[in-house]
Image (tube, rainbow, N blue to C red):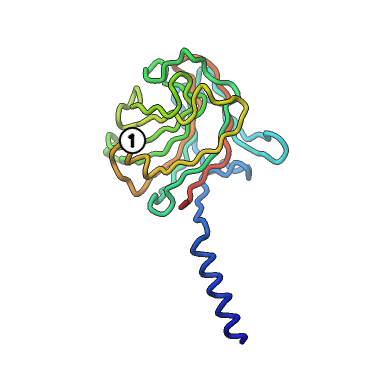
Amino acid sequence: MQLRFLCLICLSLLSDSSIAEQRLVVGEFSAGRLENWEAHEFEQLTDYRLVEDGPGNRVLKAESRASASGLYHKQRIDLEKTPFMHWRWKVVQPLSKKVQERTKAGDDYAARLYVLVDGGLRFWQTKSINYVWASNLPQMTVWPNAYAGNSVMMLALRAREAQLNTWYNETRNVREDFKQLMGQEFRFIDAVALMTDTDNSREAATALYGDIYFSDQ
C-alpha cells in the first residue's frame, strides 16, 4: 500500500512539472533590480528610476524631456522554449497627436519595448520589433521604422485611445510576430530594451514599466 502511495505521489509530481509554466524574468523592477540593464544614450538622457506607484507596487519610471536614451538587457532567449513576452506599462504624460510616427521627425514614443536579434559584425542583419505606445497612428498599425527601414518593424500595441494613468497588461508571441511582421523565423533573440524618447519632437513624456518576463504559454 505504501509503495502504491509513493508511486501516486511521484506521478502527481511529474504531472505538475509537465504543466508548470516555464518563466524567464528579464526585468524584475518590483524587486528593485536594475543591475542587468545598461543605458544607451542617443540624445540627452531620459530619466529612469525605480519608484513606488502605490503601496507595494515598485516599477520603473521614465521621464523624457527632448531626450532619447534607452535601457537594454542583453540575454539570449530561446523562443522555441519561451516565445511569449509579458509586461505591463502605463503612460502618464503622452506625446501630442501631431507627432507623425512614420517620419524621422516623429520617431518618438511615450513608451516602447523592443526585442532584438543581433547581427553581430554583420550589423545590417540586426533585426528588431518595437512594441510602441503610438500618438497618432491607430492601434495595431504596423510600419517600418523611419530610420532603419524593414530591419526594424513597429507595432502600435497601444495608441491614442488608450486611457492615461491606467496599467495595461501585454502578452506577445515574439516568435510569431517575427514571422508575421518580418517574414522570418528566429529561434533566439539577444536583447530586450525599453525606451521613452522625445528627441525628435522636442516634446515631453512620462511612462511607467512593470516587470518583464518570457514564458512558454
**Frontmost residue, 117 versus 19:** 19
Q: Position of residue 124 (x, y in %)?
A: 27, 34
- On the image, numbered disc 1 is attached to which residue? 181
- Pick the front one: 215 or 1: 1
**Where is residue 165 shown, x and y percent of the image?**
62, 27
Amino acid type, callout 1:
Leu
Residue at x-position 40% and y-position 15%:
105
Q: What residue is rendered at 39% in x and 29% in y?
A: 154
For residue 181, which quarter of the picture? top left
Q: Is residue 53 above or below residue 97?
A: below
Left or right of 142? Residue 161 is right
User: What is the secondary structure assignment of the residue under circle 1?
Assistant: helix
Residue lying furthest top = 98
Q: Residue furthest bottom?
A: 1
In the picture, residue 146 is in which quadrant? top left
In the rendered image, residue 28, in percent from the top left (x then y), is placed at 57, 44
Q: Quadrant of the N terminus?
A: bottom right
